[in-house]
Image (tube, rainbow, N blue to C red):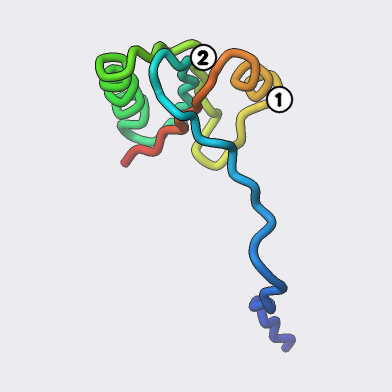
């Protein structure tokens, strides 16, 4: 029997660069990505409605994943990059 140790040694801080945060949400174009979990679409729409009321945002891109475990395709990523200032990916349940 072979045993595998899945742990690793951390070599430093993670090399992840976050996108810069906008100074204001006023008038931003939203991208919504529904991951198909229960209530995901409902939650996304409620968030979008509240952001629109409070900050004047508008939904410019909507996408639905094939399943929660799948990524969105390259065409959808390109549309989000081109047509949205802020993207919210829905998580339901």
Q: 4 left or right of 41?
A: right
How crowded pointer 1 is (Cα within 10 Å; few <14, some 14-19, many 20+) is rated as few
Q: Which residue is mark 1?
A: 74
Residue at x 43% of width, y 31% of height: 36
- Mark 1 or 2: in front is 2
Q: Position of residue 12 (x, y in %)?
A: 68, 70
Q: Which mark is residue 93?
A: none
- 1 with respect to 33 (left or right): right
Query: Is 90 situated left or right of 78 in this image?
Result: left
When asked about the image quadrant of residue 49, the answer is: top left
The answer to which of 50 and 92 lies nearer the viewer is 50
Q: Where's the C terminus, which quadrant? A: top left
Name the N-terminal-most of marks 1 and 2: 2
| Quadrant including the N terminus | bottom right
The residue wearing badge 2 is 61
**How many labels sit on residues?**
2
Q: Residue at x 55, y 42 (%)?
A: 69
Q: Which image quarter: residue 77?
A: top right
Question: Quadrant location of residue 19?
Answer: top right
């Amino acid at each position: 029997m072979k045993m595998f140790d899945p742990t690793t040694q951390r070599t430093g801080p993670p090399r992840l660069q976050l996108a810069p945060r906008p100074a204001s949400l006023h008038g931003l174009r939203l991208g919504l990505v529904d991951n198909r979990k229960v209530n995901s679409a409902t939650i996304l729409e409620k968030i979008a409605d509240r952001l629109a009321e409070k900050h004047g945002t508008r939904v410019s891109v909507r996408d639905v994943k094939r399943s929660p475990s799948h990524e969105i395709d390259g065409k959808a990523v390109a549309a989000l990059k081109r047509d949205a200032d802020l993207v919210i990916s829905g998580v339901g349940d």
